[in-house]
Image: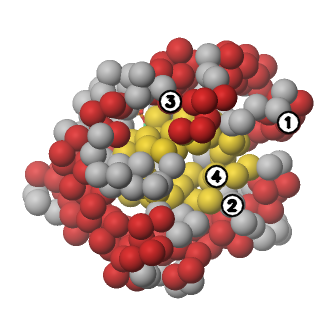
């Protein structure tokens, strides 16, 4: 058993306006007890437009939830219409920022170089980057899954001071498992999580790589979370679709029960 605390993060993607977001967080919070938060860190990542409302709710009701963002721009400030900086997110008490999600890599041109810059920007603002990596179905079928994922991890963490690496969360999200209802086999997910930890060990120390939390993402639901969490090296989940349903997300947090 590792002493890494489990982390469950809900990635709401482009769902929920700020009023809906408040309701969802309230419902989620009502379904959880303080004992749940002793065992699991829970972070919700609503769209940017809901961050301030959810921050105020968490603050006012003293909820033990963390606030996450789904993306960030790496520049500190400037003429970048439509973008949001890491400092702006930190000021909203955002603790975790998703970086390099496959949807951003696929639809919005986030290259390995951009992802690396975003990781650095998030760390500089003293937040936790949740670095997403994962192979496509074609890459898996061609036997390239491992080299692709190792390449993504190396590229994203290149130049990051080894002591800062322990402040990074890595989410292994095979693209073919995202939003498809077809999750990776727990054995395969665990194997890749182990490879990711090995990759981090090569750039740091065993103490640091032992601290990094590695999440699995891709069609996680209340029915498959327990088996995934039983695997070595899997320390939590990045949850898309199921996180929009407070009942399902609460059940994922309470996977031990
Ligand atoms: P999913 O999404 O749980 O809906 O598969 C996961 C993600 O994209 O982070």
Q: Secondary structure at mark 4?
A: strand
Mark-to-mark CA distance, 2 and 3: 22 Å
State whether residue 32 is above or below residue 203.
Answer: above
**Label 3 with label 1: CB-CB less than 8 Å:** no
In percent of the image, x 66 and y 46: which residue is there? 69
The residue drawn where x is 46% and y is 35% is 239
Callout 2: SS: loop
Q: Position of residue 193 (x, y in %)?
A: 30, 57
The residue under label 2 is 127
Of label 1 and label 2, which has the lower sequence position?
A: 1
Specify few, some or many for label 3: CA neighbours under 10 Å numbering under 14, 14-19, or 20 or more: many
Residue under the point 48% across and 45% down: 6
Give the label, 3 or 4, closer to the camera. 3
Mark 2 or mark 3: whose residue is earlier in sequence: 2
* Label 1 element class: helix
For marks 1 and 2, give the CA distance. Answer: 18 Å
Q: Residue at x 42, y 81 (%)?
A: 205
Q: Which residue is mark 4?
A: 96
- First of labels 3, 4 by sequence position: 4
Q: Is residue 115 visible?
A: no
Tell me, for residue 59, which label it has, or none. 1
In three-dimensional space, the C-alpha distance between marks 3 and 1, rounded to whole angstroms, equals 21 Å
- Residue 142 at x, y = what percent? 10, 58
Q: Quadrant of residue 218?
A: top left
Percent of width and height locating residue 129: 58, 60
């Amino acid at each position: 058993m590792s002493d890494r605390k489990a982390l469950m993060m809900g990635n709401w993607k482009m769902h929920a306006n700020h009023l809906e977001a408040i309701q969802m967080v309230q419902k989620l919070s009502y379904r959880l007890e303080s004992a749940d938060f002793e065992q699991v860190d829970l972070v919700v990542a609503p769209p940017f437009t809901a961050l301030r409302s959810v921050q105020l709710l968490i603050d006012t009701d003293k909820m033990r939830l963390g606030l996450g963002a789904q993306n960030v721009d790496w520049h500190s400030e400037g003429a970048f219409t439509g973008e949001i900086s890491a400092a702006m997110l930190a000021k909203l008490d955002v603790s975790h920022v998703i970086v390099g999600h496959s949807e951003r890599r696929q639809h919005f041109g986030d290259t390995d170089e951009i992802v690396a810059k975003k990781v650095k920007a998030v760390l500089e603002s003293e937040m936790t980057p949740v670095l997403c990596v994962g192979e496509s179905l074609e890459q898996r079928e061609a036997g390239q899954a491992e080299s692709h994922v190792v390449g993504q991890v190396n590229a994203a963490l290149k130049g990051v001071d080894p002591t800062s690496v322990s402040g990074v969360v890595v989410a292994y999200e095979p693209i073919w498992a995202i939003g498809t209802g077809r999750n990776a086999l727990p054995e395969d997910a665990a194997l890749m999580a182990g490879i990711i930890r090995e990759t981090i060990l090569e750039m740091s120390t065993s103490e640091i790589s032992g601290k990094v939390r590695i999440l699995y993402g891709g069609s996680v639901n209340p029915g498959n979370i327990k088996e995934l969490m039983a695997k070595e090296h899997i320390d939590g989940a990045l949850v898309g679709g199921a996180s929009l349903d407070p009942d399902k997300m609460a059940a994922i947090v309470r996977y031990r029960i």
